[in-house]
Image (spheres, coloured by chain):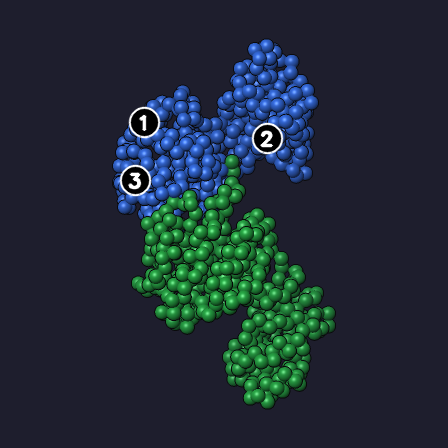
Chain colours: A blue, B green
Amino acid sequence: MDGVGDRGAETSLSRARTPHLDRLAQAGITGMLHPLGRGIVPGSDTSHLAIFGYDPHVFYKGRGAFEAFGAGLELKDKDVAFRTNFGTVDRNLVVTDRRAGRDPFGLDELYAALNGMRISDITVRVKHTVEHRGALVLSGPQLSAAVSNTDPHEVGVKLLRAKATAPEGEKTALVLNEFTEKAMRILAQHPANKLRTEQGKMPANVVLSRGAGIYFKPPSFAEKYGLKAVCIAGGALYKGAARYVGMDVPDVAGATGTTATDLGAKAAAIQRAVVGYDFVFTHVKGTDACGHDGKADLKRQMIERIDRELIVVVADLFDIIVITGDHSTPPSAKHHTADPVPILFWHADVRPDRATRLCESECMTGGLGQIVGLDIMNLVLDYLGNATMFGE
Amino acid sequence: MDGVGDRGAETSLSRARTPHLDRLAQAGITGMLHPLGRGIVPGSDTSHLAIFGYDPHVFYKGRGAFEAFGAGLELKDKDVAFRTNFGTVDRNLVVTDRRAGRDPFGLDELYAALNGMRISDITVRVKHTVEHRGALVLSGPQLSAAVSNTDPHEVGVKLLRAKATAPEGEKTALVLNEFTEKAMRILAQHPANKLRTEQGKMPANVVLSRGAGIYFKPPSFAEKYGLKAVCIAGGALYKGAARYVGMDVPDVAGATGTTATDLGAKAAAIQRAVVGYDFVFTHVKGTDACGHDGKADLKRQMIERIDRELIVVVADLFDIIVITGDHSTPPSAKHHTADPVPILFWHADVRPDRATRLCESECMTGGLGQIVGLDIMNLVLDYLGNATMFGE
């Protein structure tokens, strides 16, 4: 449950009516999770890496690679990936809308017109994800993630020229700038944009790139843990993180990565997944979105929906169930905070503690104590009886 | 509250009547602080560095630099500083009193007679702090803190010759020994010492040096955290630690660093400080002194005074209040111990735990769990909403 932790004496978790979670909490062992360590405010990407057992200080190389994965692009070692928006610029290259009016009309055709472009020895791939968002991947020799954004992150200012942030980024900056210019020429004349303009929509006439990340292949989840793993998620970032560690990531129709997601479809996908997989990672984004929007009551309702529509199903399917979030997003703060996240391990043979609910006030004195993200998979392996002993 | 933690079923904190602390504890979140990590007995200097967020394994270079700072001496990069006592030696250089009878009569004149001495290319500065204590600073090229003490730390034995504890300390040992000899010649003939002898006082005829520390300028508190900080303290060591990290350290008349300190004057200084500063560090030494003296009842009374005269005032002045100690000094042990120290965070938007008092038995199951010194400022920044996210 993304961003599920809150602050205050009463929280979304403590207020929510969650009979199925309660049952797991009563039989399970609980604690508090500091995904990246105490006092460190987790990003979603770094936190998911840590929860999967991949130290983000080693494996986190910028968000672009995760987005590209989530978009379903295949990456090879040393590809460099960016997060992109289709935006709108005026004649003087001043950004008038970073999201081209948030209107996806014709965007797939525009991506198709840019995809596969060659710039000297570099191949450019682009792919649409959701709304105005997409991913851009550069493949070829001597690329680097040491390159700044072309996205100025505000309107009314000029499109930025990418610059190398270290000498090894020079070539990548050149390629990104040349791609951005060529793309503007192609987009300006594309029939899809003429149609957008005729219909009174903003033209999607620029690709704004940010968050350069270089890809290198990490050891897979299966190699690390001997577990065949699958991801049931809607949000591109989480699907990307899962693919990065080698999980299978099927498309789940109705899983949107928003509060409107079809949890029944996710539950059904989980039920299908248990047949062929040892490990099912399920992600629900809606709780975090409510936290960012400051909507405490909607967050509580989202948790109640998760309990009613998802937990009720999974509770009888697995030998081990771990339930937590990747960080806290208190509606009172409206951003990620370093407050630890309640965490619950259910397994037939844990040491049950006194916590009767998965919530901040009960889990803060739970039997697991205060753990970090990198502890989680070690505990899972231990409950499975698959952990490696240190010593004899 | 320096050294505030105790051992035993009942402690100074648990026995003390502290209505204002209780109120903060009930609304706040508590835990146990291991300033330097579990099982490590903290010094006051290293612990304060850690609490300020400066890893003492990186920044602690011997106590001398802190004492010198506290004494108001300006240090430059690579100056080497010592803690000093004026003591008494006999004709054979046997130390007969390490504190010259603890009588400060004439000491300022004696310091003045030694201050500014040149030894080859090294300048020597000395400054009186409190009672028989002072600071000694060497400035010039090729100095090092790899040098042993001249203070034998006991009476009836000879003054020690400083020795290099590593090859780079050779020059510093030579300079310190030459200073010590020259100082003895000057002190022996000084009118202030003749007066002391005529009045039946022990002559202050030797400077005993210990605790070599090399200074280098760390990143300031303001640079690290964006917070303009001030220190309200009496003891030289704590003022030195605060100045070391770039806090402003005004003199507070009546703040003595002893149990006789004027807490009302400190409270008034805090009230003045909130106007111009973002962060106020307040230190009270008396609790620790009672612990060293084995006086449990006095320690309890000191805590009650702090509650009545200081906490009552600060409780309404700040957005965030952190209350703890730098280590435990149980009256039953009479020295610093590795027992963790109760800690309390008060802020309008924490997760209150079940602790109703700041004391060992309640905080040991508090919602913060068991934290270390370096966690504190990260938590403060997170509550302020000023923390930097790792990832996106």
Work out whether disc 1 and disc 2 sit on a shared chain: yes
Q: CA distance from mark 1 to mark 2?
A: 38 Å
**Disc 1 residue type?**
Glu
Residue at 62 percent of width and 13 percent of height? A190
* Quadrant of the snapshot with the N terminus of chain A: top left
* Residue bearing mark 3: A357
Number of the front mark, 1 or 2: 2
- Label 3 marks a residue whose chain is A
Per the image, label 3 sits on a secondary structure element best described as: loop
Residue at 55 percent of width and 26 percent of height? A135
Residue at 64 percent of width and 74 percent of height? B176
Q: Earlier in the sequence, mark 3 or mark 2?
A: 2
* Residue bearing mark 2: A153
Residue B378 percent location from the top left of the image: 49, 48
Query: Quick one: A342 or B129, which is closer to the camera?
Result: B129
Work out whether disc 1 and disc 3 sit on a shared chain: yes
Q: Is disc 2 surrounded by few (<14), some (14 to 19) or many (20+) residues within 10 Å?
A: some
* Residue bearing mark 1: A309
Does residue B19 show up?
Answer: yes
Q: CA distance from mark 1 to mark 3?
A: 18 Å
**Disc 3 residue type?**
Arg
State if disc 2 and disc 3 touch (CB < 8 Å).
Answer: no
Query: Quick one: A375 or A366, which is closer to the camera?
Result: A366
Residue B95 percent location from the top left of the image: 55, 83
